[in-house]
C-alpha cells in the first residue's frame, strides 16, 4: 500500500503499467481541487519542497509550484543563476545543504541526463525529475497520457505519433515508454538528423514524411523545435522545416480521421505548428497545461506520504472506521 | 463470551426501516426541505445519502440537492498510513453558504472522518448549520463529535468491526458486526 511509486520519480522507463495507471487515476480527483472556490487541500501540510531548477522553465516550474501549493506544502524555488551553484558548488553539495535544513522533497530540472537519478541515490528526500538532459521528463509524459485518455476515453490501441526533434527530446523518450506500456502504438516522424539511431528497436514505427504520419495517427504530439538546433546544422532553415514537417491545416484536412493535436510547449508558431492548428478545435494544448497541475499533485501526493512501519502499527492498533 | 465471526445486526428490511425513520428525522431537524443539502461521505455514505434524499423527495415532493465528499486529502494520518491511492469523487451541489448541510456516513467511530469532513466543507462556503446523520454509531469517539441522527446504536469492542453493505456497491443491504479475529484480516 505504501511506497507505491518508490522513493523517487525519475522516469517512466522503470515504472510498471499499473503504477502509471495509478498516477493517472489519482490525478482524476485532483482535477476537481483546482475547480474549487478555495483551491487547496491539506494533504501535504508541513512538507517542505524545494524546486531546484538548473535550466530555464516557466510552465513546468509554475505547474509544480501550483501543485505543491494546492496540496498545502511549503515551497522554495532555487534557480541555478544567482545561487551558490554559480560559485562552483556541486549538485550533491547543494542538495545536502538543503537537506540539512530539513526538507522533504526535491523537484529537479537539470541539463545533464541522469541528474535526477544521481541525486535520488544520494539524498534521503524524495526526488521528482522535472526534466534531465535528453533522458526523461516523466510528469510531461504523464500529463500527455492523461490528456489523451480524457479525449479518447482510452490509450490502448490508439496510434500516437511524436513529431519533430526526437533526438534531443526527453519528452519524446518519456512519452514512448509511457505510451508503449499502456498499449498504444507509437510512431515517430522527423528529419533524419533529429532521429536517434535504432529508434525502431524501441518498438515504434518510423515515418519519414509528415503526410504519412498524419494519415496513420489518431494523435499527433508535436514537439518543440529547439531553435539552437538550426545553428548547429541539424536543419537547413526554419522555413524549410515548416515546409517539410510543419503540421498545417492543409495537411490535416487530408487526414482520414480527426487527429488530436498536442504540444508540450513552448510553441514556435509557424515552425513546427501552424497557428490555426494550435488554436483549432482538435487542439488539446491548453488541456495539457491544466492536466499538468493535477498529474503533478498526484505524483507529489503518492510520493509524500507513508512510513510503512508506522502504517502497519496503526493498522494493528485501530479498527477502521 | 466469544461471538460468532460475523453477526448481522441489520438485515435488508431493518436497514430500510432505519433509513425511512432517518429521513423523517432529517425533515424534522431541518424544518422541511428548504436550504437542505445532503452530503454523503465516500464511499457508502454517498449511497445512504442518496436513499435518504429519495425518501424525502417521495414524502415531500421536493428536490433535495445532494453531494459526495471524499475526505482522504483532509485526513490527519497521511504521515502514518501513507497515501490512500484511490480517492473518490468530491461533487458538491453549488455554494453551501446559508444551507443546512446534513453529513451522511455509514459508521461513526472515532469522529476523525467527521472532523476532516467539517474542515473540507468549510472550504466550500459557510453553511448556516451542519448536522450529522449516521447509520451506525459504534461509540469509541476520540474527538468531541456527536451525531444528530442515528440509525442504530451498537456497543462494539475495540478490534471488532462494523461492516455496512449496500446494494449499489456490495450487492445487498446488510449491516454486520465482525469479530476481532476476522476483523484484522480486512484491516
Image (tube, coloured by chain):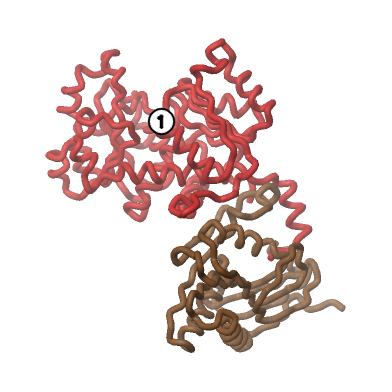
**Which residue is at the front of the view, A113 or A268?**
A268
**Residue B57 vertical position relative to residue B102 in the rendered view, above or below:** below
Residue A306 is situated, as x and y percent measured from the top left of the image, at 66, 46
Q: In the rendered view, tell whether residue B75 sits above or below residue A224.
A: below
Tell me the brown chain: B
Residue hosting label 1? A58
Residue A27 visible from this viewpoint: yes
**Residue A232 location in percent, x, y?**
29, 13
Direction top: furthest residue: A87
Pointer 1 indicates a residue of which chain? A
| Quarter of the image that includes the N terminus of chain B | bottom right
Q: Quick one: label 1, few (<14), some, or many (20+) residues within 10 Å?
A: few
Relative side of B43 to A238, left or right: right
Under circle 1, the secondary element is loop
Q: Quadrant of residue B70?
A: bottom right
Where is residue A10? Give x, y as percent: 52, 33
Vertical comparison of A230 with B175: above or below: above
Which residue is found at the position 51% from the left and 44% from the top? A297
Residue A320 horizontal side relative to residue A119, left or right: right
- Give A73 or A235, whichever is nearer the viewer: A73
Name the residue at 51% across, 72% down. Answer: B37
Q: Quadrant of residue B154?
A: bottom right
Q: Is residue B46 visible?
A: no
At x 69%, y 61%, the residue is: B112
Figure chain in red: A
Q: Nearer the viewer, residue B130 or A8?
A: B130
Horizontal and vertical percent for residue A234? Answer: 27, 17
Amino acid at each position: 500500500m505504501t511506497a507505491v511509486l518508490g522513493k523517487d520519480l525519475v522516469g517512466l522507463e522503470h515504472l510498471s503499467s499499473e503504477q502509471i495507471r495509478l498516477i493517472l487515476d489519482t490525478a482524476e480527483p485532483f482535477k476537481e481541487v483546482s475547480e474549487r472556490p478555495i483551491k487547496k487541500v491539506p494533504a501535504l501540510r508541513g512538507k517542505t519542497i524545494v524546486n531546484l531548477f538548473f535550466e530555464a522553465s516557466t510552465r513546468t516550474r509554475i505547474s509544480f509550484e501550483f501543485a505543491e501549493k494546492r496540496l498545502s506544502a511549503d515551497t522554495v524555488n532555487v534557480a541555478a543563476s544567482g545561487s551558490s551553484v554559480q560559485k562552483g558548488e556541486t549538485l550533491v553539495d547543494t542538495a545536502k545543504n538543503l537537506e540539512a535544513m530539513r526538507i522533504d522533497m526535491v523537484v529537479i530540472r537539470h541539463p545533464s541526463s541522469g541528474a535526477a537519478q544521481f541525486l535520488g541515490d544520494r539524498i534521503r528526500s524524495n526526488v521528482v525529475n522535472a526534466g534531465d538532459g535528453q533522458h526523461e521528463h516523466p510528469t510531461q509524459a504523464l500529463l500527455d497520457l492523461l490528456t489523451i485518455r480524457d479525449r479518447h476515453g482510452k490509450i490502448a490501441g490508439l496510434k500516437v505519433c511524436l513529431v519533430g526533434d526526437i533526438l534531443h527530446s526527453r519528452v519524446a523518450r518519456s512519452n514512448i515508454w509511457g505510451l508503449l506500456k499502456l498499449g498504444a502504438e507509437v510512431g515517430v516522424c522527423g528529419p533524419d538528423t533529429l532521429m536517434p539511431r535504432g529508434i525502431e528497436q524501441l518498438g515504434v514505427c518510423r515515418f519519414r514524411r509528415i503526410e504519412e504520419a498524419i494519415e496513420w495517427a489518431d494523435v499527433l504530439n508535436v514537439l518543440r523545435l529547439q531553435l539552437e538546433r538550426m545553428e548547429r546544422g541539424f536543419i537547413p532553415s526554419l522555413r524549410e522545416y515548416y515546409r517539410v514537417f510543419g503540421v498545417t491545416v492543409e495537411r490535416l484536412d487530408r487526414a482520414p480521421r480527426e487527429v488530436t493535436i498536442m504540444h508540450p510547449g513552448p510553441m514556435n508558431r509557424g515552425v513546427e505548428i501552424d497557428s490555426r492548428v494550435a488554436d483549432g478545435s482538435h487542439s488539446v494544448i491548453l488541456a495539457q497545461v491544466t492536466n499538468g497541475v493535477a498529474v503533478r499533485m498526484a505524483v507529489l501526493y503518492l510520493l509524500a506520504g507513508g512510513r510503512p512501519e508506522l502504517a502497519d502499527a496503526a493498522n494493528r492498533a485501530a479498527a477502521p472506521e | 463470551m466469544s461471538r460468532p465471526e460475523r453477526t448481522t445486526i441489520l438485515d435488508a428490511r431493518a436497514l430500510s426501516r432505519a433509513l425511512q425513520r432517518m429521513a423523517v428525522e432529517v425533515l424534522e431537524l431541518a424544518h422541511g426541505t428548504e436550504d437542505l443539502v445532503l452530503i454523503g461521505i465516500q464511499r457508502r455514505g454517498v449511497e445512504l445519502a442518496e436513499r435518504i434524499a429519495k425518501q424525502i423527495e417521495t414524502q415531500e415532493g421536493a428536490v433535495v440537492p445532494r453531494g459526495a465528499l471524499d475526505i482522504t486529502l483532509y485526513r490527519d494520518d497521511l504521515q502514518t498510513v501513507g497515501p490512500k491511492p484511490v480517492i473518490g469523487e468530491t461533487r458538491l451541489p453549488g455554494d453551501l453558504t446559508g444551507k443546512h448541510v446534513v453529513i451522511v456516513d455509514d459508521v461513526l467511530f472515532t469522529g476523525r472522518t467527521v472532523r476532516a469532513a467539517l474542515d473540507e466543507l468549510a472550504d466550500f462556503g459557510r453553511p448556516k448549520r451542519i448536522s450529522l446523520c449516521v447509520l451506525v454509531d459504534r461509540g469509541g469517539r476520540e474527538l468531541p463529535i456527536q451525531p444528530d441522527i442515528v440509525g442504530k446504536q451498537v456497543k462494539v469492542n475495540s478490534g471488532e468491526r462494523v461492516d455496512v453493505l449496500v446494494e449499489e456497491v456490495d450487492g445487498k443491504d446488510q449491516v454486520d458486526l465482525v469479530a476481532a479475529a476476522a476483523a484484522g484480516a480486512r484491516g
